[in-house]
Image (spheres, rainbow, N blue to C red):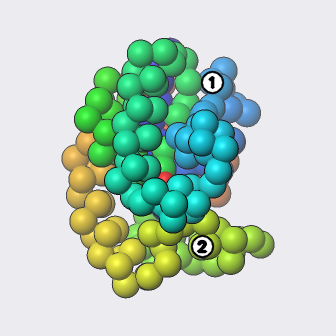
Amino acid sequence: MKNIVLIGFMGVGKGSIAREFIKISDYIAVDTDDLIESMQNRKIKEIFEDEGEAYFRGLEKNVGMWLENSVKNTLISTGGGFYKVENLKNIGTIVFLDSPFDSILKRIKKHPNATQKLKKRPLLKDLKKAKALYDIRRPEYLALADIVINVEKKSASECAEELLNKVGSNV
Ligand code: S3P
């Protein structure tokens, strides 16, 4: 089994889909933000505030190297900017979770912890800037993807099923 790497914009549902996927497959799941938070013993929001974004991107790069060299048979969910690590393609099959920006916002807002979900993401503070970032990133995500899953209007478990069917021939 090759690693599967979920990429996509903040709030698109990478973590939720990963949690559903491990229920229906033999994969173990890890999340790059969780790895960074546990290594640093502080939240992403604090890392951004204390050290700045460039420092965080350096941590993502280190995680990317470790994933390539040491991790196998794993579903890896990533932070929305992780796709920029240079070795992304060496880590595993790249799966882009695609959704329009407005649907992503709706998804976050309907969550019981919506305020928390928005607060923990420094790059979602200013929605105009977040939309501009989305517009830059979407074509970049698409260009890197081996597989694209349109997640709009689908539950996390439906997306996980689709992922399992699509990766079947790719891993
Ligand atoms: C970021 C996305 C976040 C987190 C950090 C930066 C980004 O992860 O890594 O706040 O650059 O898009 P999620 O995609 O899980 O929100």
Q: Amino acid at mark 1?
A: Tyr
User: Marks 2 and 1: CB-CB under 8 Å?
Assistant: no
Rendered view: 51 above or below 129: above
Instruction: Name the quadrant containing residue 22.
Output: top right
Residue 58's spot in the image, x, y percent? Answer: 37, 42
> Within 10 angstroms of label 1, few (less than 14), some, or many (20 or more) residues?
some
Which of the two discs, 2 and 1, sits closer to the camera? 2
> Would you name the residue on which mark 1 appears?
27
> Would you name the residue on which mark 2 appears?
118
Residue 163's spot in the image, x, y percent? Answer: 52, 38
Spatial CA distance of label 2 from label 1 is: 29 Å
N-terminal-most mark, 2 or 1: 1
Q: Could you tell me which secondary element the residue under label 1 belongs to?
A: loop
Residue 115 seen in render = yes
**Quarter of the C terminus within the rendering:** top left
Residue 8 seen in render = no
Residue 44's spot in the image, x, y percent? Answer: 56, 55
Rendered view: 53 above or below 75: below
- Residue drawn at x 41%, y 15% as measured from the top left: 69
> Within 10 angstroms of label 2, few (less than 14), some, or many (20 or more) residues?
some
Q: Amino acid at mark 2?
A: Leu
- Residue drawn at x 64%, y 78% as measured from the top left: 109
Rendered view: 101 above or below 32: below
Task: Report whether the residue tagged 1 is closer than 8 Å to ligand 1.
Answer: no
